[in-house]
Amino acid sequence: MISYLQIDKLTKSFGDLVLFEDITFGVAQGQKIGLIAKNGTGKTTLLNIIGGKEDYDSGEVVFRKDLRVGYLEQSPSYPEELTVLQACFHSKNETVRLIAEYEEAMAKEDHSNLEDILTRMDSFKAWDYEQKAKQILGQLKIHNFNQKIGELSGGQLKRVALANVLITDPELIILDEPTNHLDMRTKDILKDALKKFDGTVIVVSHDRDFLIGLADKVYEFTNKNIKEYLGGVTHFLEAKKLECFREYEQMHPRKVQVEEKVAEQPVSENKAAFEERKQWNKEIKRSEVKIEKSELEIADLEQAIVDAEGKMATGTISDELLKTYDEAKKRLEACMREWEEENERLEMLKSKVGN
């Protein structure tokens, strides 16, 4: 496969805080990459470096020559007075800027520079861009092209920003937490659009459900370095479970040996272990109930966001609703981590002391 991006021995720090050190990885044509890490490990900083928005201490960031790159920021913003269609042409891309220049010239009474603009429009084959923008917006379920940016919800704005990226025909799209503040419907629209995109994608996201079926390779930031997992998110999760078990085995070799001896004895002779297993099962069940409650809460909040989005002509989605939604998502993530940790710690003994 053709190499699109190569990161070699990249290091970035802020004072004494080292975010990552000597990280090396590559991205090839057609790959869909999921970048996973805990908060504060430097994911967004890495994307800013790749996007040319931030410096780094040492190393190299090398793109294939003339590669067209689109960057969807975590919190895209546009002047509120722009229409949806105008926002699609709010870009540093030369062709897109030429179209914006043409639109501006047509809106003025003085057309003295119009001939020059028309000549350049022909040269850049820019005439199809407006129709292409409308087509892409339609695919992303945005149909009111004259609606003002200031009237859009967070989810609608994210979709307009994606259209802004796609209209430039990028070969590589980089997305930073694209599902933040999005309801399930909008997530599905965004995910479907990225799956159909025939270029290369790098997605930084904490939303594993969004990455499942989209990412065919996972890079994980860990211990100021980066680790590669082939086979997508499902393989990544299975590999992490195995790694956690091995780490547990190394940290508690005596306990593992005791558990193995316990497992060799009949269940009737292992009442203490059997009771401990039952208690562990209860803890796991409690976590599952908490997860179910959190998922139901999030579903209700997502529906509330969808309902509010339908009333966007009269206002915007309240900050309080979005804050409540974010907090609910964090609670669910905490519950999922708790459930995973319990299973990783206890699965071995569960399987060995029998039913």
Image (spheres, rainbow, N blue to C red):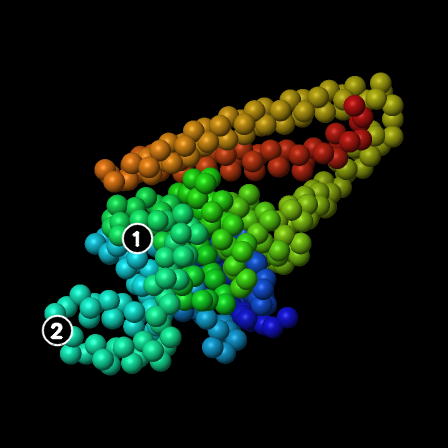
Q: Which residue is mark 1?
A: 145
State left or right for residue 186 relative to residue 338: left
Percent coordinates x, y for residue 74 in the rendering:
40, 53
Tell me the residue at 51%/38% (across/down): 333
Amino acid type of the residue tagged 1 in the rendering: Phe
Q: Are marks 1 and 2 in contact (CB under 8 Å)?
A: no
Tell me the residue at 21%/54% (across/down): 81
Instruction: Report helix, strand or loop for mark 1.
Output: loop
Q: Nearer the viewer, residue 265 or 2?
A: 2
Instruction: Report helix, strand or loop for mark 2.
Output: loop
* Image mark count: 2
Task: Give the alpha-carbon distance from disc 1 to disc 2, as whole Å.
Answer: 26 Å
State left or right for residue 279 relative to residue 193: right
Q: Which residue is mark 2?
A: 110
Which image quarter holds the C terminus? Answer: top right
Tell me the residue at 76%/41% (across/down): 253
Q: Report which quarter residue 208 is drawn in.
A: top right
Which image quarter holds the N terminus? Answer: bottom right
State left or right for residue 163 relative to residue 262: left
Closer to the chain start, of discs 1 and 2, is 2
* Label drawn at residue 278: none
Percent coordinates x, y for residue 304 in the rendering:
37, 32
